[in-house]
């Protein structure tokens, strides 16, 4: 909970305004790891002078003859207990000479105006900005977000970045800048503005103390304010010590915040006297009403905090989400500028997670993601930020990178952790990860470039075989830009009819007669010329264009088939490649059934070449689609057989007609070598299951003869014919009309 109002001092401070170490059962014994250099600094600096403001309620303030109190003082007390040191609290203003201090107790956001100090990287409070309105004059329904303030006048404190962020994200809001909170609340009372967006903990305290009953709190915004300590630039050890101490005590320490919440029901002596004079007769009634109202406010504030947490943290893994990551990255960049030490960003994508999620269900996938998040977090330092971007993507922000070796060590540690088996609900699952790494400022000066470069490096690590990490390079960026350009051209090509089908015959190895042909798509780019499928099919799959492209290939195949059958002199079969991604939208494939029927072409004139991966643990939609296609006679061929699992049991289960031995085994085929033994074994097992075998990539007579000796049924490759456009393929068929399908 972030809204805490108090009328009692929370920290006991000696008359000399000193904070001594005391007895704190919740802190003593807490583990904090200090370096020898940090320990030596503390030994030589047992008393630390702290600059504290006197009018920043309830963060830090001082009323008349009282001593300083507030949440920043509470944190200082905790740190004193943790480190057994003494703080000297000295009041200061913007005009004070800061050289007499070692540190500043509280700085909001990036509002530090002196170059002699720098903000500690770890804030001790992160508070949401909340929408406030005048409930006495507001005519609209209760506001739920900034979207409800379009074309409204909204007061915003002019110092800070909140106004700029609201303008960038909600350009229709009319921003009214104010100097102080009193000005904003007075404008709200007079109806000069429709709403005020301010720091929740400060505004709530202010409105209650000054009894501004017209103020109503509506809803949190996506924006937050961080409150941090600041340290002199010549005290780097103190900065590091404070960061570690705050990490141990905890940001938004619940114990301290709960203490302030408990204090809400208490009353300052002077206010009690004032109330007694004004409403002595109704004191008891008002007290009960006050306690009731506070309870309602606490419940509402807790609800608002829940909303804020939902906006900043991933609900599944409890890690920071993309929004909070951007705030942390902004802080880390500022820190890197001060320390002159590089900042690293690790973009992590889990390999094969989609397969686990699709085959075992989302509940298993969610549990795997939670455990993967825990493993990743355990591999990095306490001060590093691990965030979940969504799906199976994670990102790590690491500050103060002293050498590349330690960064590589962390990457390898993450890879090793994610390689270990995941035991979920009695089953064992295996995944890996691809990691892209980019450095600030070497690889980019702003968040957008850094995140883009990390993503590009991650994509390259997947391209190179997965389960590895890859640092960003200029060549990766060049390849990424080329991929983006090709993606754009590919989208244009579909509308401009730049694709054409080539046909490569498949022959009977026993008599070399043409048996069928495979339809192969080619891209005739207007400036780049002929582009092979290996260069654009993967991009089509990544962009989702594979569905539209696959539909075009199928339709064109049906248009060409009658001409091909006529030149062949009888019924002819064409093979069409179908991507696994196309089965994610089975409705498109099921429409092919109606298209085939309406064309009058027999179903067995079409064969679909699919990958074995599709059949290993197929969804019900995949099974249903295959069964309906098989029902009209469409044949199924497993392409690139031998490069995956080669599980023949699945081939028989789905009544597969034939398999194509991948060309990588054919290219090195020689008598009695490994590839020869493997090919012969595949052919023998397939035949026992009554499945035909096609060998692709045949280029030599030796390869053909060996495969024929192994009783391989059919062959495809340059030895027989290269892929050729329709008109050339028709000429080839006409010239060999004497060859008939056996």
Image (cartoon, rainbow, N blue to C red):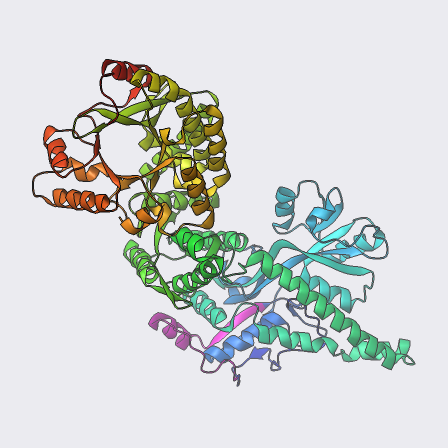
Q: Position of residue 104 (x, y in %)?
A: 55, 65
Name which residue lies at 46% across and 43% down. 584
Q: Which quadrant does the C terminus fall into? A: top left
Report if residue 217 lies within the magenta region.
Answer: no
Judge by depth and name the residue closer to the eye, 504 or 166.
504
Quarter of image, res 294: bottom right
Tell me if residue 56 can be seen: no
Name which residue lies at 25% across and 22% down. 740
Indicate left or right for 464 with 398 as reference: left
The magenta stretch spans which residues?
Answer: 25-51
Name which residue lies at 67% across and 64% down. 303
Judge by depth and name the residue closer to the eye, 396 or 338.
396
Q: Position of residue 64 (x, y in %)?
A: 72, 74
Q: Position of residue 63 (x, y in %)?
A: 71, 73
- In the image, farthest residue toward the right: 281
Q: How many marks?
A: 0
């Amino acid at each position: 909970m972030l809204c805490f109002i108090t009328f009692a001092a929370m920290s006991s401070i000696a008359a000399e305004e000193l904070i001594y170490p005391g007895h704190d059962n919740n802190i003593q014994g807490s583990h904090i790891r200090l370096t020898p250099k940090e320990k030596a600094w503390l030994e030589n600096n047992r008393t630390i002078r702290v600059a504290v403001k006197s009018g920043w309620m309830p963060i830090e303030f001082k009323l008349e003859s009282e001593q300083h109190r507030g949440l920043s003082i509470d944190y200082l007390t905790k740190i004193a207990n943790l480190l057994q040191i003494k703080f000297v609290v000295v009041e200061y203003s913007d005009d004070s000479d800061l050289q007499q201090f070692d540190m500043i107790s509280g700085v909001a956001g990036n509002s530090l105006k002196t170059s002699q100090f720098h903000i500690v990287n770890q804030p001790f409070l992160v508070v949401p900005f909340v929408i406030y309105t005048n409930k006495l004059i507001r005519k609209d329904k209760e506001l739920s977000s900034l979207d409800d303030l379009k074309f409204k006048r909204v007061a915003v404190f002019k110092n800070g970045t909140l106004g700029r962020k609201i303008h960038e994200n909600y350009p229709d809001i009319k921003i009214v800048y104010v100097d102080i909170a009193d000005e904003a609340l007075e404008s709200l009372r007079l109806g000069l503005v429709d709403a005020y967006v301010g720091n929740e903990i400060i505004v709530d305290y202010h409105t209650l103390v000054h009894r501004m009953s017209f103020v109503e709190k509506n809803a949190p915004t996506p924006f937050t304010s961080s409150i941090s300590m600041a340290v002199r630039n010549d005290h780097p050890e103190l900065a590091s010590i404070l960061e570690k101490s705050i990490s141990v005590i905890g940001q938004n320490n619940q114990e301290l915040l709960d203490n302030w919440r408990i204090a809400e029901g208490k009353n300052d002596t002077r206010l009690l006297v004032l109330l007694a004079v004004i409403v002595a007769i109704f004191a008891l009634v008002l007290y009960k009403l006050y306690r009731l109202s506070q309870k309602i406010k606490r419940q509402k504030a807790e609800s608002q905090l829940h909303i804020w947490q939902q906006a900043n943290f991933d609900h599944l893994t409890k890690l920071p989400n993309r929004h909070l990551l951007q705030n942390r990255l902004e802080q880390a960049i500022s820190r890197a500028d001060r320390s002159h030490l590089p900042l690293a960003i690790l973009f992590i994508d889990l390999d094969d997670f989609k397969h686990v999620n699709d085959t075992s269900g989302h509940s298993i996938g969610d549990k795997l993601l939670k455990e993967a998040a825990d493993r990743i977090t355990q591999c990095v330092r306490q001060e590093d930020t691990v965030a979940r971007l969504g799906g199976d993507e994670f990102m790590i922000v690491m500050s103060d990178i002293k050498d590349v070796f330690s960064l590589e060590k962390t990457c390898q540690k993450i890879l090793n952790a994610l390689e270990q088996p995941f035991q979920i609900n009695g089953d064992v699952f295996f995944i890996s990860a691809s990691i892209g790494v980019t450095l600030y400022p070497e690889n980019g000066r702003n968040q957008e470039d850094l995140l883009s470069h990390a993503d590009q490096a991650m994509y390259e690590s997947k391209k190179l075989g997965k389960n590895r990490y890859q640092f960003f390079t200029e060549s990766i960026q060049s390849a990424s830009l080329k991929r983006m350009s090709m993606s754009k051209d590919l989208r244009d090509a579909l509308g401009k009819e730049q694709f054409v089908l080539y046909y490569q015959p498949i022959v009977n190895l026993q008599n070399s007669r043409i048996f069928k042909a495979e339809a192969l798509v080619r891209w005739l780019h207007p400036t780049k010329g002929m582009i092979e499928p290996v260069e654009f099919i993967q991009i089509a799959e990544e962009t989702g264009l594979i569905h539209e492209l696959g539909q075009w290939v199928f339709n064109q195949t049906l248009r060409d088939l009658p001409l091909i059958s006529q030149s062949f002199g009888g019924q002819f079969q064409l093979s069409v490649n179908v991507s696994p991604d196309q089965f994610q939208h089975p409705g498109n494939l099921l429409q092919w059934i109606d298209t085939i029927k309406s064309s009058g072409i027999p179903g067995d004139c079409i064969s679909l070449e699919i990958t074995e991966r599709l059949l290993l643990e197929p969804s019900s939609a995949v099974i249903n689609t295959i069964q309906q296609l098989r029902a009209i006679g469409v044949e199924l061929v497993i392409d690139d057989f031998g490069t995956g699992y080669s599980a023949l049991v699945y081939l028989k289960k789905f009544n597969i007609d034939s398999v194509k031995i991948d060309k990588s085994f054919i290219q090195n085929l020689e008598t009695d070598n490994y590839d020869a033994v493997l090919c012969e074994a595949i052919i023998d097992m397939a035949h026992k299951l009554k499945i035909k075998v096609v060998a692709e990539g045949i280029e030599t007579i030796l390869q053909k003869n060996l495969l024929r000796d192994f009783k391989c049924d059919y062959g495809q490759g340059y030895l027989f014919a290269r892929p050729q456009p329709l008109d050339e393929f028709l000429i080839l068929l006409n010239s060999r009309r004497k060859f008939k399908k056996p």
